[in-house]
Image (spheres, rainbow, N blue to C red):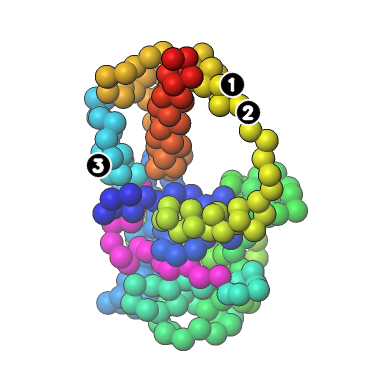
Amino acid sequence: MGLTPAWVPPETPSEVTGPCFVHQLQSNGHAHALSFHAPLAQVETSVVEPPSLPDDWPDDGATLAAAEVTPHTVHQVWVATQLPMTDKWTLKSAQGTFLACDRYGEVTATNEARGPQEEWTLQLVDTVPSESALVGPRRGFAFQSHYGGYLTLDAPKDEQGRRRRVRADVSAPTDGGVWDLRVQWKYRHAHRQTQRKSTAAPASRASLLDEAKLSLSRQGWTAGTTAQLTQESRRELLRAQREGRLAEAMLDRRSKLKSDKYAKVCVHSLIQ
């Protein structure tokens, strides 16, 4: 994965583990990132702007890694840990202190020890009612404090609104209380691998020849050429960037390219 970690969105609360980027994407592509301002010892949000993509941007790892809305400093990263046998999480700042909330909804991050005030219930939010998600204005995640309030982005105190405070005295997830999360790919991957091992079942597989023929029928031979972005692929990747899931889309695309390349080798060996 290189020196720069890939930040990907979790699909369920259980996938929120390890370094976590807690933010709210805006319609202009910017994000308000949950941050701990150490000099002032206060929790707030700071604005993160996405880099612009040129029309002729190359399909290489360095460019793709730089095209996502990702944390700019360690103060925008929180280490998420699920407490064993519970639906509670803790969020640890880069200074080693935990995100907390008192009975009045005041959000702080000054304690180095964990207690009830440092525990948060992480809940999935969706626009469609379901047993596994709360109903909210959009899809995302909500953090409920020990006292029942939801972590919410406060209204801006200035016109620019680059730094905004947060509070947790709201009784239901509003638009400012739905958060977008990104975790590092290796932690999500490790969690999914563990889940697969615990719930694995025999899967039916098509024959190698059938798979090779299917792959061959869906693509042309491109041996000896470099991977190029088609117009459709470019549109899909640009859409993924706007939705904050470019890294995941690229991982899926590269996995497919590897599978296609392997299928071609299989076809050669089978038809010779």
Question: Looking at numbered disc 3 in the image, what kind of residue is underneath it?
Answer: Ala
| Helix, strand or loop under label 2 | loop
Dot in front, 3 or 1: 1
Which range of residues does the magenta coloring cover? 69-82
Residue depicted at 58% across the width and 74% down the height: 83
Residue depicted at 29% across the width and 31% down the height: 59
Question: Looking at numbered disc 1 in the image, what kind of residue is underneath it?
Answer: Asp
Instruction: Indicate which disc, 3 or 1, sits on the residue closer to the N terminus.
Output: 3
Where is residue 184 drawn, in percent x and y? 41, 56
The residue beneath circle 1 is 210
The residue beneath circle 2 is 206
Outermost residue on the front side: it is 272
Can residue 2 be seen by looking at this rendering?
yes
Q: Quadrant of the C terminus?
A: top left
Front position in the image: 156 or 184: 184
- How many labels were placed on the picture? 3
Q: Quadrant of residue 39?
A: bottom left
| Helix, strand or loop under label 3 | helix
Front position in the image: 171 or 206: 206
Q: Is residue 75 left or right of residue 113?
A: left
Are the two marked residues, 2 and 1, in contact with CB atoms closer than 8 angstroms?
Answer: yes
